[in-house]
Structure formats: structure tokens, C-alpha cells
């Protein structure tokens, strides 16, 4: 029988800065769900990728003096880039889309044209307030305190000829979708969308830009590029081969089972996205799940505040699984969460080191100590076993209910109830007492077996969250891959009766909280004040600047100016050159007469205090100190600096 398809996506990330723990949160959550569904027997397609167009990228590349393509290539594929991060975090995506991929670009052009031909995209002119970082136009009424309602940053007035999507036409069907179906979850997000956006009046959406070029060109109207969100949202379909030949599983996987998205982009996914799909007459995704945000010490994480949490650093210190686990165990998926280093360390210590790690290492050590590593097959049940065995057998059902309801934190919480119960079971049965009595050997073997089989069930259900560690656990408790399966997780007693254990490394070392907090504090000390980025200068640009050696013929103060000195210079041309320079605070005019200095001599003339200045004298300045560049007199006037 062929497997049922399950298609799940993360948002595609902007490769504008290094990704932080918030981005990692969403991708790990998607990964856990994808692994869970695979384990349940679905034919999963898990897509992630990067959203590489737009003005922000164009500007950042320019500031670095590289092309936008070079800029995004570096952040996506370079060392320590997005692909590296997902590899490190053990993300099991089946596909990765980059919106600069040729097949995607060509498909977006066709999609845009199709909506245009249908009359759902039309040409008009746009006046509004524009937020550059968010690449969004806003009406005055949408602004919050005059700032961008999404990110809170400054907006500026902008006007351009543009194409519009008839979003207003789809207001009612989208409203019905949100209010009459389970399309958007958690439900709390529905009211926000309906009240704040749809019922407030859904205006047509500006879907092209002419103010920059780094985007998908509108092929039938040069000068326009497709709005980055149209380009971005359709990634979910082009990555399956919609309107392109790169892939051919659109029929199989579309509509998506679920799009995981952060709360601030729910608007795009629950209003604009279904409206455009309706226009394209395509089936709608089955669900959009808007997860909450991770804040840091109660504040929004942002690069400018310098409080972004670095997943590389944490994964390196505590292990990838500990980090994945912490993210999924601690924060209810639909709500905001507050990341603190204390919480991270205490979760690792309590759940992983004490509860799970200890259970595994104690059990394995006792089987080795009391039975040389292999259990005998005889058993002796006791009422003391009943609660533990019943809990273990019932766990998979509860776990699945929570996972299917997008509550991974609750699925984990149930799993850890069993783990705690198993630790208590050790104390109740006191194997070290049983071991002293030869007649209790069978009972002791039963206790050990029960513990090992509880570990098998718990570890099977933990695979989506901490896959690497579960492999190690299976190895230690002697659970082969045909035993540690989802099917077997619903039943107690699936380990072979004569199971053999293997001693392994400590799974989750305990962390010294105080020492570690100090270390983290040091590591995250605010970086030295940022040096403003200096745009790179091409050799061609540099060659345009003419710097020449000049001899100072005269030098005097400019009347009524405290700053300016007026120079007459011999630049070797035979005609004296007048330059004004703001260095009066640093030099007395008479000191400079006769000196050999350097000036830029091909600048356009400009007036300063009513007098013409024809060039600029070169000096060096730092921290309130200034030195003119003074050369050896032997070099003649007019010599060029090269
Ligand atoms: O929005 N906590 O990309 P993006 C939790 N390119 N999630 C967070 C977070 C935090 N502190 N910070 C960011 C985009 N995220 C678009 C998506 S999809 C067609 C286009 C989440 O890189 C954020 O909520 O700015 C979003 O879901 C994801 O990271 C990508 O953000």
C-alpha cells in the first residue's frame, strides 16, 4: 500500500543576517513534526529554504561592495551559513528552495502573468508609507505611532507606478475560510486577522516595485520587479514543480498539510496567500500554524539590541539534541516564550541529565552489574509493575494526540511523566536489595526488563526531538531498529526477553549552573561598538580620483570663519589653485607656507563662506587629532599619487 503524503514547510528565511535561536526554533519544530510523521508511516516532504530577493538584500550587498547574488550565496552556502546551521541542527528537510533558483524565478513570472491575464493583477499608482526593512507599504491608518506596525521602525512616504493584486475581491471568501474552518491555528490568531485586517477593510495589495531591481522581473513590463512576498509565498508550490520542470510532485503533495510560520507573518499566510491561491484557482493549504516568538530575558530578540541568541554557540556547548529538546520542551508552541540561560541549563539538568540520562545509565549499569549485561528469560510479575506498565502502554496514544494537535511540548511532557515514574519505580523496587537475595533473581530480572522496555518506548517517542541521542539509547538498551519502531511503541514487552545491554558514554552531562552562567555572560558580552560599514570602492572608482602633489604658495585665515584656511597652491599646471580647508583649529597659516602637500584636484568647484574652493587637501584625522599629509620637498608640484 502506498504511503499517505504529508507536506510540511517552514517559512523561507531572509539571508540578510546570521540566523538566531528564534529562526532555529521554527525549523526544529518543523523538523520534529516531519520526523514524527515519517515515523508514523507518512511519505513526508519537508521543505525549507531562503527568501533572497528585495531591497534590503540589494542595499546590504551594495554596502559590502558585492553583488546581491554573491551576498546571498555567502549567507546561504558559505561557512557557518544557513545550510551549515541546518546540518548542525540535524534538520531532515527533503528539499531546500532558494528564490533565486532559475526554475523558481521563471515560475513566478508565469504565475504573475496568469493573475494579470485573469484581471486580478492590474496596473495603478501607489502612494503610501514604506518600511524598507519589511519591504511593506502601509496606509497612514495602519501605522502604529507613525511607525511600521510589523517591526516598529521608521517608515517614509513613497510613490510609484505599480501593479496591484485585487485582494479586496477575496475578502469574503478569505474571511469565511478563517472563521468557518480550522485553516488557521491557534484559534487566537483568527480574531486578530479578521478584526485588524479583514474587517478593517482589505485594500488591494501592491505587488510590484520599481525602486530597486533585485527581484523577479515582471517580464511583460521591464522596470518592475515582483513584490517579494508574492515571490516568496509561491515557493511552497514551485518547490514541488508548479509551473516548472525542476520537480514533478506537485500533484502528489499539494495542498500542503501545514505551513509552520511565526506569528508576525501569519497575515501573509492566512490572508494574502489563500487569496492568491484562490485567484490561481488552486487548492488551499490545509493549515497554517502561527507559532509564538522567543524573546530573550523578556525582550524581543534583535540584532540592533545586541541580544540575539546564537544557536551555534549553544549547540557547541551543550550538544545539538540538548538544544533541540530545550526549544521543544519548554515553550508551548503557539505562544511566546522567554529564553533565558538559566532556563536552558536547568531544563538540560533536570530533564535530560537527571531524569532521562540517569534512568538509562542506572538501568544499564545494574543489568551489567547483576546479570553481566544479558537478562535471563524468566519473569516474576508483581502488582508494583502495573502502574508503570499501564502508563507505558498508554503513552503513545496520548503523545500522538498532542503531536497531531501541534502541541509538541505536551507530547514531551507526557513522555517525561513516564520517565519520572520509571525513576520512582527503581526506588520502589530497590534492585540493590533484591540483588542481595539469590531467590529474588527472577524478580530482579523482571524489574530490569520493565525499566529497559519503558526506556525503549520513551526513546522511540523522543526520536523526533533528539534523534542522535535516541540512537545511542537504543544501542545501550539493546533495542534493534526493527524493535524500536512506532508500531511497537504502543505495546509493552517488545524487547527480547534475553536482551543484552551495552555500556555507553554519558548521554547528557550535568552542567554546573553558576559556572556556566558566568561563562555565557562573558561570551555574550556586548561586542565592541560597531565600526560603520565603509562601502567598498572599485578600482575603477578609485582611478577617477586625481591626487596631486602641491606646494603651498600662500595660506591665510578666512574672515569670520573659525574653521577655514584659504590656500593658494602650485599644482604644477602653471595656474595657482585655490582650496579652502577646515583645518584652522590645527595649524597656523604661516606654518604651512612652502610645505609640500597632497590635494584632490578633480573635484567640482564649490563655495565655502562665499569663496570658491577647487579641490580638497588630504589630511588624516582620528579622535580629535589631525595631521596634514606633508611630503618631502624633493617631489615636484603636479606629481600624481598612484
Ligand atoms: O519572515 N522567535 O523571514 P525571516 C520565533 N522571508 N520565531 C522567530 C523569531 C523569534 N525570536 N524571529 C524570527 C521571513 N522568527 C520571510 C518568510 S515565507 C514565504 C517568507 C521566525 O527570516 C519568524 O517568525 O524574517 C518567521 O516565521 C521565520 O523566523 C523567518 O523569518
Image: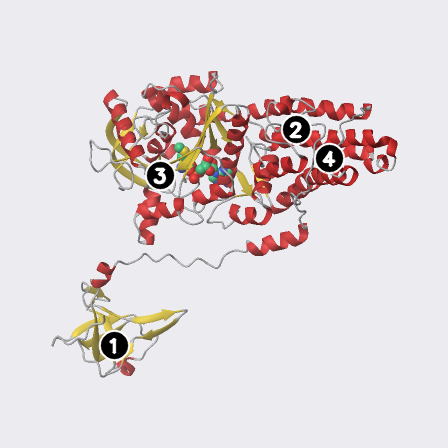
First in residue order: circle 4 vs circle 3:
3
Tag 4 secondary structure: loop
Identify the residue shown where x is 43% and y is 43%: 82
The reply to whether residue 405 is in sight is no
Around disc 3, counting alpha carbons within 10 Å, would you say few (fewer than 14), some (14 to 19), or many (20 or more)? some
Quadrant holding ligand 1?
Answer: top left
| Colouring chosen for the image of the structure | secondary structure
Report the residue marked by disc 4: 374
Report the mark closest to the observer, 4 or 1. 4
Q: Position of residue 542 (x, y in %)?
A: 24, 62
Q: CA distance from mark 2 to mark 1?
A: 81 Å
Q: Which quarter of the figure has residue 496?
A: top right
Q: Position of residue 291 (x, y in %)?
A: 51, 32
Q: CA distance from mark 4 to mark 1?
A: 89 Å
Q: Which mark is residue 597?
A: 1
Tag 1 secondary structure: strand
Q: Position of residue 297 (x, y in %)?
A: 58, 45
Q: CA distance from mark 2 to mark 3?
A: 48 Å
Q: CA distance from mark 2 to mark 4?
A: 19 Å
First in residue order: circle 2 vs circle 4:
4
Q: Which quarter of the figure has residue 538?
A: bottom left
Apparent side of residue 579 relative to residue 250 in the rendered image (left or right): left
Identify the residue shown where x is 36% and y is 70%: 621
Q: CA distance from mark 1 to mark 3?
A: 48 Å
Q: Which mark is residue 135?
A: 3
First in residue order: circle 4 vs circle 1:
4
Can you name the residue that lies furthest to the left here? 574
Q: Quadrant of the C terminus?
A: bottom left
Identify the residue shown where x is 49% and y is 37%: 91
Report the mark closest to the observer, 2 or 3. 2
Report the mark closest to the observer, 2 or 4. 4
Report the residue marked by disc 2: 457
Amino acid at each position: 500500500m502506498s504511503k499517505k503524503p504529508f507536506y510540511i514547510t517552514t517559512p523561507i528565511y531572509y539571508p540578510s543576517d546570521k540566523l538566531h535561536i528564534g529562526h532555529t526554533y521554527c525549523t526544529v519544530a518543523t523538523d520534529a513534526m516531519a520526523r514524527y510523521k515519517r515515523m508514523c508511516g507518512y511519505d513526508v516532504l519537508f521543505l525549507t529554504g531562503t527568501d533572497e530577493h528585495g531591497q534590503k538584500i540589494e542595499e546590504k550587498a551594495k554596502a559590502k561592495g558585492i553583488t546581491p547574488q554573491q551576498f546571498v550565496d555567502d549567507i546561504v552556502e558559505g561557512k557557518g551559513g544557513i545550510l551549515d546551521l541546518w546540518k548542525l541542527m540535524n534538520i531532515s528537510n527533503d528539499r531546500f528552495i532558494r528564490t533565486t533558483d532559475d526554475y523558481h524565478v521563471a515560475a513566478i513570472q508565469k504565475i504573475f502573468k496568469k493573475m494579470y491575464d485573469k484581471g486580478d493583477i492590474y496596473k495603478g499608482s501607489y502612494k503610501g508609507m514604506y518600511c524598507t526593512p519589511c519591504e511593506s507599504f502601509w496606509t497612514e491608518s495602519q501605522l502604529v505611532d507613525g511607525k511600521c506596525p510589523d517591526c516598529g521602525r521608521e517608515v517614509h512616504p513613497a510613490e510609484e507606478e505599480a501593479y496591484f493584486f485585487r485582494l479586496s475581491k477575496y475578502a469574503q471568501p478569505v474571511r469565511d475560510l478563517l472563521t468557518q474552518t480550522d485553516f488557521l491555528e491557534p484559534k487566537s490568531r483568527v480574531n486578530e486577522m479578521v478584526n485588524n485586517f479583514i474587517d478593517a477593510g482589505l485594500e488591494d495589495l501592491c505587488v510590484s516595485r520599481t525602486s530597486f531591481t533585485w527581484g523577479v522581473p515582471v517580464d511583460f513590463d521591464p522596470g518592475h520587479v515582483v513584490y517579494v512576498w508574492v515571490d516568496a509565498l509561491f515557493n511552497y508550490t514551485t518547490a514541488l514543480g508548479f509551473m516548472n520542470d525542476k520537480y514533478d510532485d506537485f500533484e502528489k503533495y499539494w495542498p500542503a498539510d501545514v505551513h509552520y510560520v511565526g506569528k508576525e507573518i501569519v497575515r501573509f499566510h492566512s490572508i494574502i496567500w489563500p487569496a492568491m491561491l484562490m485567484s490561481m484557482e488552486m487548492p488551499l493549504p490545509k493549515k497554517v500554524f502561527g507559532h509564538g516568538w522567543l524573546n530573550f530575558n523578556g525582550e524581543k530578540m534583535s540584532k540592533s539590541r545586541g541580544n540575539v541568541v546564537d544557536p551555534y554557540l549553544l549547540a557547541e556547548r551543550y550538544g545539538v539534541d540538548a538544544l533541540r529538546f530545550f526549544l521543544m520542551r519548554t515553550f508551548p508552541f503557539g505562544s511566546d516564550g522567554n529564553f533565558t540561560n538559566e532556563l536552558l541549563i536547568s531544563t538540560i539538568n533536570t530533564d535530560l541529565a537527571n531524569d532521562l540520562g540517569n534512568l538509562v545509565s542506572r538501568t544499564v549499569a545494574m543489568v551489567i552489574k547483576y546479570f553481566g549485561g544479558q537478562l535471563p528469560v524468566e519473569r516474576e510479575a508483581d502488582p508494583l509493575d502495573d502502574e508503570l506498565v499501564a502508563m507505558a502502554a498508554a503513552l503513545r496514544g496520548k503523545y500522538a494526540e498532542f503531536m497531531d494537535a501541534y502541541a509538541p511540548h505536551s507530547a514531551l511532557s507526557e513522555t517525561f511523566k513516564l520517565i519520572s515514574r520509571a525513576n520512582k519505580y527503581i526506588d520502589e523496587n530497590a534492585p540493590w536489595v533484591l540483588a542481595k537475595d539469590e531467590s529474588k533473581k527472577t524478580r530482579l530480572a523482571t524489574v530490569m526488563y520493565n525499566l529497559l522496555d519503558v526506556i525503549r518506548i520513551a526513546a522511540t517517542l523522543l526520536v523526533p526531538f533528539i534523534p542522535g541521542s535516541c540512537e545511542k539509547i537504543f544501542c545501550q538498551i539493546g533495542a534493534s531498529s526493527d524493535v524500536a519502531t512506532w508500531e511497537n511503541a504502543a505495546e509493552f514487552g517488545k524487547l527480547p526477553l534475553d536482551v543484552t545491554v551495552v555500556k555507553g558514554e554519558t548521554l547528557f552531562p550535568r552542567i554546573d549552573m553558576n559556572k556556566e552562567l558566568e561563562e555565557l555572560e562573558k561570551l555574550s558580552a556586548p561586542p565592541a561598538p560597531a565600526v560603520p560599514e565603509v562601502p567598498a570602492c572599485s578600482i575603477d572608482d578609485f582611478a577617477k580620483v586625481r591626487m596631486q602633489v602641491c606646494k603651498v604658495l600662500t595660506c591665510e585665515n578666512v574672515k569670520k570663519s573659525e574653521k577655514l584656511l584659504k590656500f593658494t597652491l602650485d599644482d604644477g599646471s602653471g595656474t595657482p589653485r585655490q582650496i579652502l580647508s577646515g583645518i584652522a583649529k590645527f595649524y597656523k597659516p604661516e606654518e604651512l607656507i612652502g610645505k609640500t602637500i597632497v590635494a584632490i584636484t578633480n573635484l567640482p568647484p564649490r563655495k565655502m563662506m562665499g569663496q570658491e574652493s577647487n579641490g580638497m587637501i588630504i589630511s588624516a584625522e582620528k579622535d580629535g587629532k589631525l595631521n596634514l599629509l606633508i611630503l618631502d620637498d624633493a617631489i615636484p608640484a603636479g606629481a600624481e599619487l598612484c
